[in-house]
Image (cartoon, grey):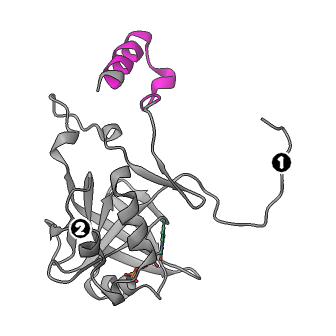
Amino acid sequence: MSDRYRDLSPTTLLSPVPVVLVSCGTAEKPNALAVAWAGTVCSHPPMVSVSIRPSRYSYGLIRESGEFVVNLPSAAFAKAVDYCGVRSGRDGDKLAACGLRVRPMPGLNGAPAVEGMPAQLGCQVRQVIPLGSHELFLAEIVSVRVREDLFAGDGSLCLDRADLLCYSHGVYQRAGDALGFFGWSVARPDVLARRMAELRSR
Ligand SMILES: Cc1cc2nc3c(=O)[nH]c(=O)nc-3n(C[C@H](O)[C@H](O)[C@H](O)COP(=O)(O)O)c2cc1C
């Protein structure tokens, strides 16, 4: 490890970031695009942001319907995510080309979710803010579906088992091993030992 730094021109280097598959359109005519400029922006109400260039085919679909689904992909879907990020829905059904199917998302009027994804967030657009190259869609999460196999016997959600995909400066990566849990740096020793044992056993 070097203690020297190199100065770069200002750029979008926040890393790693989640890369998600944003589905839109309708169940009969669905579309999806890869989005890496996505984030959680509010807890109550639960909200996410996605930044989309107006030139994307999906941009018009989302503007028109005011809704979309954020699908959280596992590493198994990495190639499909990439394909949906380099081809446009203007030229054909990308989801079908990847062998992916959609189903209606509860709480939304038409935007479908992509089957098989570990988690799906149904989103309704609340605000659109032009930023420059991208427009920021601020959306409320109105429904959430999580794949059944990601729940432990006691009903707790184990997203760390989902093998979620992330993205770092042009490279797709797995989210990796669980290292700790929220508050572990200050947990009582008995709580730390019990929770770490639970984490490692799942
Ligand atoms: C890994 C990855 C991340 C991407 N992130 C974004 C993004 O955050 N916003 C965006 O507008 N386009 C993003 N893109 C590009 C779109 O996904 C791409 O232009 C796609 O073909 C648009 O599809 P559409 O025309 O069917 O909407 C990304 C592409 C890749 C491969």
Q: Is residue 83 above or below residue 117?
A: below
Q: Is residue 29 above or below residue 83?
A: below
In which quadrant of the rendered view does residue 168 lie? bottom right
Q: Position of residue 8 (x, y in %)?
A: 79, 61
Crowdedness near tag 1: few (<14), some (14–19) or many (≥20) residues, C-alpha within 10 Å: few
Q: Are marks 2 and 1 in contact (CB under 8 Å)?
A: no
Q: Where is residue 109 in the image (x, y as percent from the top left)?
A: 15, 77
Marks 2 and 1 sit apart, C-alpha to C-alpha, by: 45 Å
Q: Mark 1 points at which residue?
A: 5
Q: Mark 2 points at which residue?
A: 99
Residue at 83% across, 48% down: 5
- Mark 2 or 1: the one toward you: 2
Image quadrant containing the N terminus: top right
In magenta stretch: residue 193:
yes
Task: Point out the residue furthest to the top here.
Answer: 190
Left or right, 36 with respect to 193, comes to: right
Q: Give the main secondary structure of the magenta stretch.
A: helix
Residue at 44% across, 19% down: 187
The mark that comes first in sequence, 2 or 1, is: 1
Secondary element at image label 1 = loop
Q: Which amino acid does label 1 sit on?
A: Tyr
Give, as a single range, the part of the protein colored magenta. 179-199
The disc label shown at residue 198, or none: none
Left or right, 56 with respect to 162, comes to: right
Q: Which amino acid does label 2 sit on?
A: Gly
Q: Is residue 150 above or below residue 166?
A: above
Residue at 43% across, 14% down: 188
**Residue 5 visible from this viewpoint:** yes
Q: Where is residue 74 in the image (x, y as percent from the top left)?
A: 34, 51
Residue at 82% across, 38% down: 2
